[in-house]
Image (cartoon, helix red, strand yellow):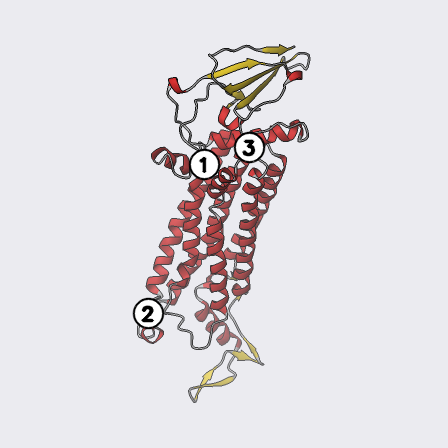
Amino acid sequence: MVQQLNTACDICMLMAWILSLGETITMYKVTEYGHYGYHRKDAYKLKYNMVLIWQYLYANGITYNPILGLIKASMILLYLRLGGTKTGVRTACYVLFIFNFLFITGALVADIFQCWPMTYIWNRRAMDRAAQLAAGATDPGTYRDRPVPTGFKDGEYVKGGDCIDMGNFLVITAGISIFTDLLILLIPVYMVYDLQLTPKKKFVVLLVLCMGIAVTAVGITRLWIIFRTYHPKKGQDWSYSVKSTIAHIETGLALVTGCIPDLFPLFRRFFPNFLRSESPNLAPNPYPCKSDSGSSVSRRIRNVLTASRERGRVAFDEERSVAFGLEMVGWRGERGRLADGDRDVHVRGAAVGSMGSLTRSQDVVEEETGDGKGGILKTTRSVVRDGESSGEQSQWSVV
């Protein structure tokens, strides 16, 4: 299951990256042919190919929502991989994944068919003129004291096609995108808030998992720019601006922050002390315990978990699985070992029913095995602690 989730995350991110290449190329062409960055008085002197500009704008616009949707899907699958054994995390991931899929599908369909016929998107002037001539829309009008056809007939403007209100569409989709961003960012917060970690360790984990907050900030800026574009101030120089690139800043930043969780272990390999929550000179991991999936959890991860009677076995298993998921992506980054002369580990067996009190330096390792038929249950519990005694170990089993 973990491998399938890893593959799905990578596929979503790769598809988003491919679409972002198309988004970048089309926006470059729009900026070039639309003469963005020139003052309005200078831009009027240049030649415009409006059909070509609108074709590139159309191709550029239909890539935005799928890119963000695929990146969000990748992040949701990542959270499902790390904390999917926790009921709340799993439910939130499923709900948000379905909502995200429905949203990007609806937004993509609306983008593709924003006008009908579709050629009306980039050939509006010619199609309007043809429809007005065919309908005899010749109501008189004036422009600079000269009579001109207005395109009106019986007080109604004749058009060659119909389009949705793109201003409202862009504002609504931008608002929904920001809202889903915030909901997705709540998943890692819920995932780690009840782990028995120091505040510094929680901060490091949340910092890596919640990098997307920067994308949300850019999305809010884009929403404000969209509003100003469709409600401009008087005398605003619409041409002397590159604000149209804000969407590409958002998608590019989303790609970078979406890759950080998987790149973080590699980064820590080259910079071991970066955002380290504790000293790298830790004892090795000689006593792993089994997770629910059969993989081992290091004693360092196990040491931050507390199986109190009040919290119950289910809550503890969920917490253990989340910690296991965090270690599997290498975020602990703790590969340091003490010299043999500086380490002395003492293992003493204890019956499950008479656990006794533990000190901070002790660690409880528990493993349950069965015959698969519900007939035999074997519980093995060991207490591991650092001490001055020589290495001695024993085991107490209840069958």
Residue 140 screen position, x and y as percent: 50, 85
Residue 200 on image: x %, y %: 49, 40
Residue at mark 1 to residue at mark 3: CA–CA distance:
18 Å
Q: Residue at x 41, y 54 (%)?
A: 249
Q: Earlier in the sequence, mark 2 or mark 3?
A: 2
Q: Are marks 2 and 3 in contact (CB under 8 Å)?
A: no
Element at label 1: loop
Q: Which residue is mark 3?
A: 322
Label drawn at residue 297: none
Name the amino acid, label 3.
Val
- 10 Å crowding of disc 1: few (<14), some (14-19), many (20+): some
Q: Residue at image x 53%, y 21%?
A: 289
**Spot occupied by residue 111 in the image (x, y as percentages of width and height):** 51, 57
Say if residue 16 shows up in the picture. no
Q: Is residue 275 above or below residue 216?
A: above
For disc 2, the neighbor class at 10 Å (few under 14, some 14 to 19, many from 20) is some
**Looking at the rendered structure, which numbered label has been put on residue 277?**
1
Which residue is denoted by mark 2 in the rendering? Answer: 38
Q: Which one is in front, 111 or 207?
A: 207
Q: Amino acid at mark 1?
A: Ser
